[in-house]
Image: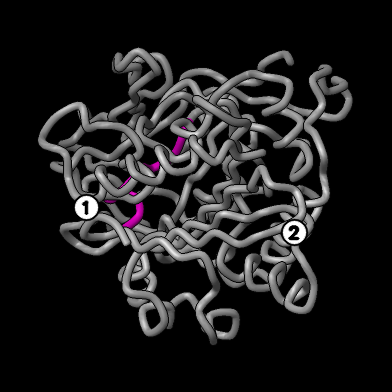
Amino acid sequence: MSNNLLHELDYLPEGLLDCSASELHKYLQGPSLIHLQGRRQEPLFVSVLLHGNEPAGWQAIQLLLRRYQNEELPRCLSLFIGNISAAKEGLRRLNGQPDYNRIWCPPDQGEMTDEHRMTEQIVTTMRDRKPFASIDIHNNTGINPHYGCVNRVDNRFLWLATYFSRTVVYFIRPKGVQSAAFAEFCPAVTVECGQPGQRYGVEHAAEFLDALIHLAVLPEKAVPEHDIDVFHTVAIVKVPETISFGFAAGELDCQIQFVNDLDHMNFRELSPRTILADVKNDSETICLEVIDDDGQDRWNDFFEIREGKLCTVQPVMPSMLTLDERVIRQDCLCYLMERMPV
């Protein structure tokens, strides 16, 4: 046992492999770090349900562990099951909660919360256990391909990501993500498994984990160029709290009305003057927040309002565009990326 939030176990509670993400609260007292024994001692660390509405990671773990119910795991496994209370409600996070994938470093502003102290304890515990690698599993709310995300351009990290997908995104913002905390002491990747409810995403994540627990080492050599596509996140785009927005077609009853197929633009290079939204005639000065890695606003570099339309200024490739208004408010509208050489 540990602080007010974290519960640490060395066994899998009975019934856990048969319950849904929304039922985990019946079996676990809260966020839980579970250590399972295997032949190779350096554990694979896996975090799931940092966002309660993204169940693919938990479902993949269930699929994986059912395969080994009657035999020893090839490698030790340390499993962190995150925001169980939000999973109960099918939400990314509950009102009043921090985002569980923004609490893995001390906050820039404000005091340390119980959630920050919880992740500090997990990092300390796992650093001592010398993990083989760290995997954080997520779903998307928009239409995106399966891809891996890394916080370091390091051959071992890139190999780890390409075992999941040839599409890899390198990013350093937002701060406080799980993969960045673990990247300080082991190869770490975040994998994005498509939208919730897609069986292929669950199976893909389970096969990825199964391959890793059989793997002895991660290669040190470079990934061949023809086996990887790397993109760098250059800016995060948010809708300011003071701006109203929506997606419904027809009369414009909010300040920004995005096109209905906005999430189909993910991982597509948009040409200049691509229309993203209608804006009210009296709102010509409206802009989105477009913040780069240095914390600078880049609105004028990427967007403009032309004749009542929100348009791109230069070629740009977005990711994580979604039609979920709650997620946009809690997180962001999208990320902007550029292709980078390996």
Q: Which residues are magenta?
A: 326-335
- Residue 261 is at least partly visible in this image: yes
- Look at the picture and state if 119 lies above or below 56: above
Q: Is residue 222 left or right of residue 317?
A: right
Point 21% across, 38% down: residue: 240
Q: Quadrant of residue 157?
A: top right
Residue position marked by numbered label 1 in the rendering: 254
Q: Are marks 2 and 1 in contact (CB under 8 Å)?
A: no
x and y percent of residue 274 in the render?
52, 32
- Look at the picture and state if 245 lies above or below 315: below
x and y percent of residue 35 in the render?
54, 59
x and y percent of residue 209 in the render?
72, 54
Residue type at mark 2: give it: His
Q: Secondary structure at mark 2?
A: helix
Sequence-first tag of 2 and 1: 2
Q: Is residue 327 magenta?
A: yes
x and y percent of residue 93 in the render?
30, 60
Residue closest to the eye, 116 or 208? 116
Residue position marked by numbered label 2 in the rendering: 204
Question: In what quadrant of the picture does the C terminus appear?
Answer: top right
Question: In what quadrant of the picture does the N terminus appear?
Answer: bottom left
- Residue 266 is at least partly visible in this image: no
Q: Is residue 240 magenta?
A: no
Q: CA distance from mark 2 to mark 1?
A: 39 Å
Q: Is residue 218 left or right of residue 334?
A: right
Point 43% across, 30% down: residue: 311
Q: Secondary structure at mark 1?
A: loop
Q: Quadrant of residue 76?
A: bottom right
